[in-house]
Amino acid sequence: MKGLIRKNLQTIIGVILIVVLFTNTGAKAWVLRRLMDLGIFNAHIQEKPVWDVAAFNYQDAATGTVFNISSLKGKVVFISFWASWCPPCRAEFSSVMSLYNRFKDNPHVAFILINEDDDPAKARAFLEKEDAALPIYKTADMVPVSVYNGTLPTTVILDKEGKIRYHHEGLADYGKEDFANQMIEIVNH
Protein backbone atom coordinates (compact mmCIF):
# COMPACT_ATOMS: atom_id res chain seq x y z
CA MET A 1 0.00 0.00 0.00
CA LYS A 2 2.85 2.43 0.85
CA GLY A 3 4.39 1.82 -2.54
CA LEU A 4 1.08 2.56 -4.27
CA ILE A 5 0.66 5.83 -2.34
CA ARG A 6 4.27 6.87 -2.92
CA LYS A 7 3.95 6.07 -6.64
CA ASN A 8 0.74 8.15 -6.98
CA LEU A 9 1.54 10.94 -4.49
CA GLN A 10 1.53 13.71 -7.12
CA THR A 11 -1.81 12.55 -8.48
CA ILE A 12 -3.30 12.37 -4.98
CA ILE A 13 -2.06 15.88 -4.14
CA GLY A 14 -3.39 17.18 -7.47
CA VAL A 15 -6.83 15.68 -6.86
CA ILE A 16 -6.93 17.15 -3.34
CA LEU A 17 -6.01 20.60 -4.69
CA ILE A 18 -8.68 20.40 -7.37
CA VAL A 19 -11.33 19.38 -4.83
CA VAL A 20 -10.33 22.28 -2.56
CA LEU A 21 -10.47 24.76 -5.46
CA PHE A 22 -13.93 23.56 -6.50
CA THR A 23 -15.36 23.61 -2.98
CA ASN A 24 -13.69 26.55 -1.22
CA THR A 25 -14.53 30.10 -2.33
CA GLY A 26 -11.57 31.57 -0.44
CA ALA A 27 -9.14 29.18 -2.13
CA LYS A 28 -10.49 30.09 -5.57
CA ALA A 29 -10.18 33.79 -4.78
CA TRP A 30 -6.59 33.28 -3.53
CA VAL A 31 -5.57 31.52 -6.78
CA LEU A 32 -7.24 34.23 -8.88
CA ARG A 33 -5.45 36.96 -6.89
CA ARG A 34 -2.11 35.26 -7.61
CA LEU A 35 -2.98 35.18 -11.32
CA MET A 36 -3.83 38.90 -11.12
CA ASP A 37 -0.39 39.51 -9.60
CA LEU A 38 1.11 37.97 -12.73
CA GLY A 39 -0.67 40.59 -14.85
CA ILE A 40 -3.02 38.16 -16.57
CA PHE A 41 -6.15 40.21 -15.79
CA ASN A 42 -4.92 43.78 -16.33
CA ALA A 43 -7.77 46.17 -17.10
CA HIS A 44 -7.48 48.73 -19.86
CA ILE A 45 -9.89 51.42 -21.00
CA GLN A 46 -9.83 51.21 -24.76
CA GLU A 47 -10.73 53.90 -27.20
CA LYS A 48 -14.03 52.61 -28.49
CA PRO A 49 -17.40 54.10 -29.27
CA VAL A 50 -19.35 55.14 -26.22
CA TRP A 51 -23.09 54.76 -25.78
CA ASP A 52 -25.57 56.36 -23.48
CA VAL A 53 -26.57 54.50 -20.37
CA ALA A 54 -30.27 54.35 -19.68
CA ALA A 55 -31.08 55.62 -16.22
CA PHE A 56 -31.53 53.08 -13.49
CA ASN A 57 -32.13 53.23 -9.77
CA TYR A 58 -30.04 51.75 -6.99
CA GLN A 59 -30.53 51.91 -3.26
CA ASP A 60 -28.50 52.06 -0.09
CA ALA A 61 -29.00 48.63 1.51
CA ALA A 62 -28.73 50.09 5.04
CA THR A 63 -31.09 53.06 4.73
CA GLY A 64 -33.25 52.09 1.76
CA THR A 65 -32.60 55.48 0.15
CA VAL A 66 -33.04 55.22 -3.63
CA PHE A 67 -30.75 57.05 -6.05
CA ASN A 68 -30.79 57.39 -9.83
CA ILE A 69 -27.50 56.88 -11.65
CA SER A 70 -28.21 59.98 -13.77
CA SER A 71 -27.86 62.11 -10.62
CA LEU A 72 -24.11 61.49 -10.89
CA LYS A 73 -23.72 63.23 -14.25
CA GLY A 74 -20.72 65.50 -14.09
CA LYS A 75 -18.69 62.80 -12.34
CA VAL A 76 -16.78 59.79 -13.61
CA VAL A 77 -18.61 56.82 -12.10
CA PHE A 78 -16.99 53.46 -11.36
CA ILE A 79 -19.75 50.83 -10.98
CA SER A 80 -18.97 47.33 -9.78
CA PHE A 81 -21.58 44.56 -9.61
CA TRP A 82 -20.27 41.94 -7.15
CA ALA A 83 -21.22 39.33 -4.56
CA SER A 84 -19.38 37.99 -1.54
CA TRP A 85 -19.88 34.37 -2.68
CA CYS A 86 -18.29 35.06 -6.10
CA PRO A 87 -14.57 34.01 -6.20
CA PRO A 88 -13.60 36.39 -9.06
CA CYS A 89 -15.36 39.24 -7.20
CA ARG A 90 -13.43 38.44 -4.05
CA ALA A 91 -10.18 38.17 -6.02
CA GLU A 92 -10.54 41.55 -7.71
CA PHE A 93 -11.86 43.33 -4.60
CA SER A 94 -8.43 44.43 -3.33
CA SER A 95 -7.69 46.03 -6.71
CA VAL A 96 -11.05 47.85 -6.65
CA MET A 97 -10.21 49.08 -3.14
CA SER A 98 -6.79 50.24 -4.34
CA LEU A 99 -8.43 52.30 -7.09
CA TYR A 100 -11.09 53.57 -4.67
CA ASN A 101 -8.44 54.68 -2.15
CA ARG A 102 -6.67 56.58 -4.90
CA PHE A 103 -9.82 58.49 -5.98
CA LYS A 104 -11.99 58.58 -2.83
CA ASP A 105 -11.17 62.24 -2.14
CA ASN A 106 -11.64 63.33 -5.76
CA PRO A 107 -14.98 65.19 -6.02
CA HIS A 108 -15.18 64.32 -9.74
CA VAL A 109 -15.22 60.54 -9.20
CA ALA A 110 -17.91 58.34 -7.63
CA PHE A 111 -17.77 54.63 -6.76
CA ILE A 112 -20.97 52.58 -6.70
CA LEU A 113 -20.43 48.99 -5.57
CA ILE A 114 -23.71 47.16 -6.19
CA ASN A 115 -23.96 43.96 -4.21
CA GLU A 116 -25.86 40.99 -5.60
CA ASP A 117 -25.89 38.86 -2.42
CA ASP A 118 -29.34 37.68 -1.35
CA ASP A 119 -28.36 38.42 2.25
CA PRO A 120 -26.89 41.91 2.88
CA ALA A 121 -25.38 40.62 6.15
CA LYS A 122 -23.00 38.42 4.14
CA ALA A 123 -21.89 41.43 2.12
CA ARG A 124 -21.35 43.48 5.30
CA ALA A 125 -19.35 40.62 6.84
CA PHE A 126 -17.16 40.42 3.74
CA LEU A 127 -16.53 44.18 3.75
CA GLU A 128 -15.68 44.08 7.47
CA LYS A 129 -13.23 41.24 6.85
CA GLU A 130 -11.62 43.29 4.06
CA ASP A 131 -11.62 46.39 6.31
CA ALA A 132 -13.60 48.29 3.69
CA ALA A 133 -15.95 50.93 5.07
CA LEU A 134 -18.09 51.32 1.96
CA PRO A 135 -21.84 51.60 1.62
CA ILE A 136 -23.61 48.56 0.22
CA TYR A 137 -25.91 49.31 -2.68
CA LYS A 138 -28.51 47.08 -4.33
CA THR A 139 -30.31 47.52 -7.61
CA ALA A 140 -33.72 49.10 -7.04
CA ASP A 141 -35.21 48.22 -10.43
CA MET A 142 -34.24 46.80 -13.81
CA VAL A 143 -30.73 47.69 -14.94
CA PRO A 144 -30.25 48.01 -18.71
CA VAL A 145 -28.59 44.93 -20.21
CA SER A 146 -25.97 47.22 -21.75
CA VAL A 147 -24.86 47.91 -18.17
CA TYR A 148 -25.43 44.59 -16.38
CA ASN A 149 -26.73 41.26 -17.65
CA GLY A 150 -26.19 39.18 -14.51
CA THR A 151 -22.52 38.24 -14.99
CA LEU A 152 -20.40 38.71 -11.87
CA PRO A 153 -18.24 40.61 -11.54
CA THR A 154 -19.22 43.31 -14.02
CA THR A 155 -17.50 46.69 -14.03
CA VAL A 156 -18.73 49.78 -15.86
CA ILE A 157 -17.20 53.24 -16.01
CA LEU A 158 -19.38 56.18 -16.99
CA ASP A 159 -17.85 59.43 -18.18
CA LYS A 160 -19.05 62.82 -16.96
CA GLU A 161 -21.87 62.81 -19.51
CA GLY A 162 -23.16 59.45 -18.26
CA LYS A 163 -21.90 57.52 -21.27
CA ILE A 164 -20.33 54.09 -20.91
CA ARG A 165 -16.58 54.33 -21.47
CA TYR A 166 -15.63 50.93 -20.07
CA HIS A 167 -17.59 47.72 -19.71
CA HIS A 168 -16.02 44.47 -18.54
CA GLU A 169 -17.55 41.19 -17.44
CA GLY A 170 -15.30 38.97 -15.34
CA LEU A 171 -12.15 39.37 -13.31
CA ALA A 172 -9.86 42.35 -13.91
CA ASP A 173 -7.09 44.15 -12.02
CA TYR A 174 -7.99 47.79 -11.36
CA GLY A 175 -5.11 48.46 -8.98
CA LYS A 176 -2.43 49.14 -11.58
CA GLU A 177 -1.02 52.62 -12.15
CA ASP A 178 -1.82 52.40 -15.87
CA PHE A 179 -5.53 51.95 -15.18
CA ALA A 180 -5.56 54.83 -12.66
CA ASN A 181 -3.93 57.06 -15.29
CA GLN A 182 -6.65 56.12 -17.77
CA MET A 183 -9.27 57.11 -15.18
CA ILE A 184 -7.47 60.44 -14.71
CA GLU A 185 -7.66 61.03 -18.48
CA ILE A 186 -11.44 60.56 -18.38
CA VAL A 187 -11.74 62.84 -15.32
CA ASN A 188 -9.70 65.55 -17.05
CA HIS A 189 -11.57 65.29 -20.36
Image (cartoon, helix red, strand yellow):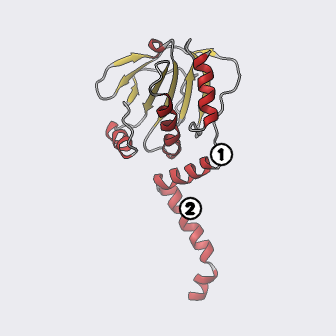
Question: At x 43% / y 34%, what residue is drawn?
Answer: 116
Q: Quadrant of the N terminus?
A: bottom right
What secondary structure is marked by label 2? helix
> Can residue 1 be seen by looking at this rendering?
no
Q: What's the amino acid at mark 1? A: Gly
The image quadrant that residue 139 belongs to is top left
Q: Which of 3/64 is in front?
A: 64
Question: At x 59% / y 25%, what residue is drawn?
Answer: 183
Structural distance between the alpha carbons of marks 2 and 1: 23 Å
**Classed neighbour count for the residue bearing mark 1: other residues with Cα under 10 Å, few (<14), some (14–19), many (≥20):** few
Question: At x 40% / y 44%, what residue is drawn?
Answer: 130
* Residue 57 rendering spot, x and y as whole percentages: 42, 18
> Can residue 56 be seen by looking at this rendering?
yes
Q: Which residue is situated farthest in the left direction here?
A: 63
Q: Mark on residue 39?
A: 1
Q: Earlier in the sequence, mark 2 or mark 1?
A: 2
Q: Is residue 76 left or right of residue 85?
A: right
* Residue 62 rendering spot, x and y as whole percentages: 29, 29
Q: Mark on residue 18?
A: 2
